[in-house]
Image: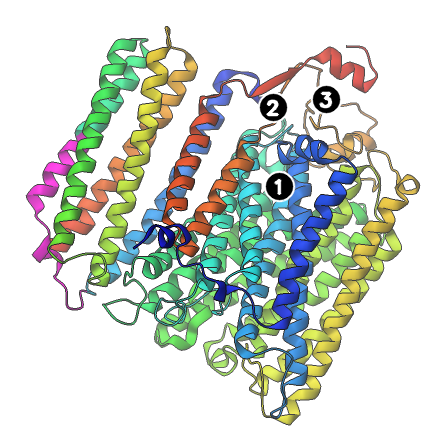
Amino acid sequence: MNVFDFLIGRMSPEYFPSDPATIGAAIGMPLGVLGIAALLTYFKKWKWLWREYITSLDAKKIGVMYIVVALVMLIRGFADTLMIRAQTAIAANGQQGPIDADTFQQVFTAHGTIMIFFVAMGLMFGLINVALPLLIGARDVAFPFLNSVSFWLFAAGMILVNFALIFGGFSAGGWLGYPPLTGLEYSPGPGVDYWLWTLQIAGVGSLLSGINFFVTIIKCRAPGMTLMKMPIFAWSVLVTTVLIMLAFPVLTATLAMLSLDRVFDMHFFTSTGGGNPMLYVNLIWAWGHPEVYILVLPAFGIYSEIVATFARKAIFGYKTMVAALIGIMFLSFIVWQHHFFTMGAGANVNAFFGIMTAIIAIPTGVKIFNWLFTMYRGRILFASPMWWFMAFVVTFTIGGATGVMMSVPALDFQVHNTMFLVAHFHNVIIGGVIFGYFAGITYWFPKIFGFTLHEGLGKASAALWQIGFILAFLPLYALGLMGAVRRIDSYTDPSWQPLFIVSAIGVMVIGAGIFAMVLQIAVSIKNRKKYVVGGDPWNGRTLEWSVPSPAPHYNFAITPIVEHQDQWWYEKEHRQKNKGVLTDIEMPKNSPLGFYIAIAAGLFGFGVIWHLWWLVGLAFVAIIVLVITRTMNDDTTYVITKEVLADEMGVAA
Amino acid sequence: MSTHTTVSEKNATAELGFWMYLMTDLMLFASLFATFYILRVGVADGPTAAEVFDINYVMAQTLVLLASSVTSGMALVSMKFSMKKQALVFLGATILLGVGFLALELNEFIALATEGNSWTTSAFLSSYFTLVGTHGLHIFIGLIWASVLFVALAKQPVVSDNHVRKLSLFTMFWHFLDLVWIFIFAVVYVIGVYA
């Protein structure tokens, strides 16, 4: 092997994109990034960006960055959707669709990967960062530096998945990449490696966040806030973090083993050499099923806060809400096999997992009824977050019902891997997860920025998403029952085409919903002076509404003393002042090391993808050196004295 | 953060975080153990566990690691009594024993590979090299960590609470790796050879 080969690994010009759609994206994306860089330079905002965001350890700032990345990725993932549905609307009866089969496979793989890991997870961690410390009366998370590392690892994964478009191509193996298709023998190129390392890097970030928020909830609650006085959102995050800590290491191990199969020619999941591809399917779903609850539980928490606030009532059945969350936590680990009833585990195993799956509908149903009973006889204000909630109840209940249908193995044999399944999981993920996080963004936006979002456009967006959703996905249920399998890029049955066309129209209506949302943000920022609000714009119940908007970087000048569930509501009702006293507080200093560690991790992944072993070695050493640098630094905090705090609050110390 | 007013509370938070990290690491190992247990019969054309493992060699390796666990505990006890010199001696001994363990393991890996029984031979050997190698990688990182602590401690004139906290986290990590090794000894070597 000569030096040149050693330096460039397996990189070669053939990996630049060749089809027109990909070339367009491969040129457009870097131009977009350059455009943003030019704007930052023109407005001299680089230093501001570095100081206020990139090196910031403030959970609220980190949360905003998560949400911005997730919304940009939503548009990227949606562009994939447009291609998928344009293809299936056109490519019937021998008609040529706009994209070829291999690109189509890459497109649906990228769509699933991006939507789950970079949109849903991004929105989730973004809102947890923004809201959780405020809700539990904390100044920050337990490990602010680790939080920054988590975010930047997430960002590094996001950059890798997009870079695949420019150079190398992405995996064509579906969002969970089952071997042996994704093994070395059938997918020798770099696409699957891009998929693996994107997920691996972002996944480690999620794992660290899980630990961080678990410890935050256990250790950093305001004095007096017992676990059973926590807002439901905090409970939902606590349960989610337990799931993250138990499930994500399985993902890390599974992806590592597939990567070892590919790089070192091992035999974990190959069909030869004693390997067992079924083992992969079990392992990936042992992570994958808890993962869907990881995504949806914080959204449930957000709905609980929103419904209580806008119905002007305490949440109905607080204890059953908590019990339901914990019930779902346990059940989510004993249902994974329902993703592959057809793979031949036998009738008894299928029956067990089928029954466990159906049982999950009980705690979930408890939650739905609790929300409805919270609204019952409430003085409901139908602000835009409530519109998202109403859309959620309808959509999610339909999705839950089709889920229970598929929990019956006999029925699942008919609809396994068909469009029926595709409709089902979009039904619960869009209706449950995405609507919840959009509601959360609308709800907490004023707390972070000091002004509300335009109400009319928010409602328009919710309505368009809901209508678009019905048009896009209900036809897929019918198609699934008619025998249309998922991931097809062409078909010969002419009776399918009208339904696929309706679905494509629905996608465009969802596109209008996304546009309304972008417009909503733009209009609100432009006219922000008109929408400026005080600390408590929604007449809220929980502690975050007791501080000014935008929330100061230390969250609470005075640590609140908690005596009641919905403490802030209680104080307003009884005209009490909080009993907390002013003290000096300790805050973390900014640090660029999280950013650097993520760059090194991204280069590590890039090195493995292209077999640049020198880069892998350098990046590994860089990560170790950076971590040591951080741990050896004992000067990581600074103190804000109570005189300064009093001055900012306008009172005497 | 409000609750971070005292050093002891800060320590308790860091310790809980570290426990949680160890639990996640345990899940990682659990996945690898499950994989090994299922794939140990996937020997294809390669050898079986009974044909390649020497239980006496592994027993020696185990004793070296257990000894390092004892010395790391002694280092922490010395630190708590502010006996810096003694702590350095025990920490140094931990590092040497750890290096010895890793050398024995590498020697076994190289011997296997040169006999033609590398990780590409069969699913059984793939999962063996990965499970034991992941433990070895943890030991390697632990050794870097211990060395950094050793240098930092040697430079300081007096022992601070901060040092005690940092060493106690390392000791937890080291004992944890010991525990994982006991399972490797039982599941990989004992069950592999005798069952």
Q: Is the magenta stretch mostly helix, strand or loop?
A: helix
Front one among B153 and B65: B153
- Tell me if mark 2 has few (under 14), some (14-19) or many (20+) residues whose alpha carbon lies within 10 angstroms of its own: some
**Cβ atoms under marks 2 and 1 closer than 8 Å:** no
Question: Which structural element holds mark 3?
Answer: loop
Amino acid tagged 2? Lys
Q: Above or below — where is B141 with respect to A601?
A: above
Name the residue: 21% across, 41% down.
B182
Amino acid tagged 3? Ala
Q: What is the C-alpha distance between the residues marked 3 and 2?
A: 17 Å
Amino acid tagged 1? Ala
**Cβ atoms under marks 3 and 2 closer than 8 Å:** no
For disc 2, the chain is: A
Q: What is the C-alpha distance between the residues marked 1 and 3?
A: 21 Å
Question: Which structural element holds mark 1?
Answer: helix
Which label sits in the foreground, 3 or 2?
2
Which label sits in the foreground, 1 or 3?
3
Question: Which structural element holds mark 2?
Answer: loop
Residue pointed to by mark 2: A589
